């Protein structure tokens, strides 16, 4: 995993999650940010801030991205979601088109 | 992708994709590509057991599983390694729920 192949996602509280671009592109919203022509500052610096997504939720989302890739490659496991995170996670998923 | 681990230090988390047959040295080399720190200045600790991971052994050997949290510590100027430092977010949902429950 090279530095250029990663993207940094930043939560509301300023926590940073560095993940593979392939994983981040499970989200259609992030895919658009990273691949659209024109100069999104996100595309150039490989960092995206989410001032409305809390750290706990953003970490769960990153875990989901990776789980999703594993699932697509045939490793069928369950993805566990704590009941108290459900609502916020759904709102974030809606925003991220995930 | 076979598995991933979460490498944490301070407020940063690296989601590292890897294979159970990779050694800790392999992982450290991947980390050094991201943070410009030589492998010798890195130490990885498995958080679930508190065990410092051995360079020559593989992830599978040391029971590092998918989604495991591994702490990254770096060598300080005095040649010692820093303490494990992982900042957690203040989880207001859980604490809020616990407090709110009494009010209903």
Image: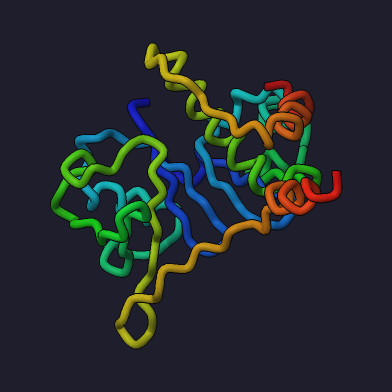
B75 shown above or below B45:
below
The quadrant of the picture occupied by the C terminus of chain A is top right
When the figure is inspected, residue A98 is found, relative to residue A50, above or below; the finding is above
Q: Residue at x 20, y 35 (%)?
A: B21
Is residue A37 shown to the viewer in this render? no
In the rendered image, residue A42, in percent from the top left (x then y), is placed at: 71, 41
Quadrant of residue A82 in the image? top right
Q: Nearer the viewer, residue A30 or B70?
A: B70
Foreground of the two, B49 or B74: B49
Q: Is residue B47 left or right of residue B63?
A: right
Residue nearest the observer in this picture, A45 or B104 = B104
The residue positioned 68% from the left and 36% from the top of the image is A84
Q: Position of residue B49 (x, y in %)?
A: 30, 55
x then y, percent, for residue A36: 73, 26
Residue B88 visible? The answer is yes
- Which residue occupies 38% across, 53% down? B70
């Amino acid at each position: 995993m090279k530095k250029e192949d990663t993207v940094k996602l930043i939560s509301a509280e300023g926590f940073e999650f560095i993940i593979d671009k392939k994983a981040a592109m499970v989200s259609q919203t992030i895919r658009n940010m990273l691949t659209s022509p024109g100069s999104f500052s996100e595309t150039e610096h490989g960092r995206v801030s989410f001032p409305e997504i809390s750290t706990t939720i953003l970490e769960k989302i990153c875990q989901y991205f990776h789980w999703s890739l594993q699932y697509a490659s045939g490793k069928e496991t369950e993805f566990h979601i704590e009941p108290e995170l459900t609502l916020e996670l759904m709102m974030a998923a809606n925003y991220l088109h995930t | 992708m076979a598995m991933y681990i979460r490498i944490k230090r301070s407020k940063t988390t690296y989601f590292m994709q890897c294979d159970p047959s990779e050694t800790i040295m392999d992982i450290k080399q991947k980390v050094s590509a991201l943070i410009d720190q030589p492998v010798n200045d890195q130490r990885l600790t498995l958080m679930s057991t508190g065990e410092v991971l051995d360079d020559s052994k593989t992830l599978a050997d040391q029971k590092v599983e998918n989604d495991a949290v591994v702490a990254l510590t770096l060598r300080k100027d005095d040649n010692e390694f820093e303490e494990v430092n992982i900042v957690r977010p203040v989880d207001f949902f859980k604490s809020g729920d616990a407090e709110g429950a009494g009010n209903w």
